[in-house]
Amino acid sequence: MRGNLDETQDQCAVEIAMEVLGGRWKLAIIRKLFLGTHRFGELRRTLPGVTQRMLTRQLRELEADGLISRTVHAEVPPRVEYALTDTGRSLERITDLLDSWGRWYRDNRPGENRDMG
Amino acid sequence: MRGNLDETQDQCAVEIAMEVLGGRWKLAIIRKLFLGTHRFGELRRTLPGVTQRMLTRQLRELEADGLISRTVHAEVPPRVEYALTDTGRSLERITDLLDSWGRWYRDNRPGENRDMG
DNA sequence: CAGCATCCTCCGTGATACTG
DNA sequence: CAGTATCACGGAGGATGCTG
């Protein structure tokens, strides 16, 4: 490991993108936020299967990576709203393409042999 | 700016795409194969840091998912060639977008606060 | 309501040695 | 050359309970 820096810089930038987008729920979160600002509980309800912990973590990572913004309203009960930043919005074409490709793939490759051994 | 999240419950096909493309080397492999058919050793050399084991695994998963084809030539020494299938080639726009976005992101978000304790 | 603390499982990933 | 077998590790992801 620890090879030449030249080699690592030669690596495809797709890996950079994947480091930021690779989390299980990140792209799903981003897609939800393309519809508008949303609260924590709203995101939680509409992401089937996500736990509070994971949603919190993924949201914080997305925030740290500059893709979303987190606004805490000093109210009772608490209200925290998440929205896309400009950087996050720059992913629109990618998420659109991934989504349509995912649908196409699901239709054209339903039950592949990954699981049938 | 508020949208109705419930309407998008079944539109998160991005996760399907991520299940197929989520491996660390998969998109890198696919990008290499867009340049043409390549042998195992060629891929290994041009993917800095990949181990034989991981390259084998990721190639087999990509094959099982129908993104690449694997051709074993009955020769001595052995020769195995990998190429994109039509399904794999359908990812061209996505890999291109991810790559250019990754470069753009790296330039515009150099050392964010994720790592700078 | 939104989140943190704790503990735990599983899998992706890796190093090394061996094989046809 | 192109793998397989084995051992090992870290971190992503998850279950549960508590808090301001």
Image: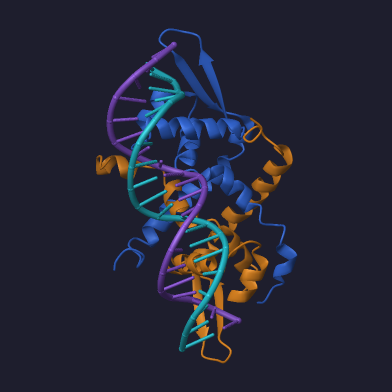
Chain colours: A orange, B blue, C purple, D cyan
Q: Hey, which quadrant is residue B47 in on the image? A: top left
Quadrant where the N terminus of chain B sits is bottom right
Left or right of residue A113, residue A74 in this image: left
Image coordinates of residue A111 in percent, x first then y, are: 70, 37
Q: Nearer the viewer, residue B71 or A88?
A: B71
Image coordinates of residue C3 in percent, x first then y, are: 49, 76
Q: Is residue A61 above or below residue B57?
A: below
Image coordinates of residue A3 in percent, x first then y, are: 25, 40
Q: Nearer the viewer, residue B86 or B48?
A: B48
What residue lies at 62% left-to-right and 52% top-to-bottom? B14
Image coordinates of residue B92 in percent, x first then y, are: 56, 40
Q: Is residue D4 above or below residue B87?
A: above
Residue B39 in view: no
Q: Is residue B9 above or below residue B50?
A: below
Q: Hey, which quadrant is residue C1 in on the image? A: bottom right
Left or right of residue B110, residue B81 in this image: right
Q: Is residue A69 above or below residue A113?
A: below
Residue A78 in view: yes
Q: Hey, which quadrant is residue A38 in on the image? A: bottom right
What residue lies at 48% left-to-right and 33% top-to-bottom? B57
Quadrant where the C terminus of chain B sits is bottom left
Number of callouts in the render? 0
What residue lies at 58% left-to-right and 75% top-to-bottom? A40
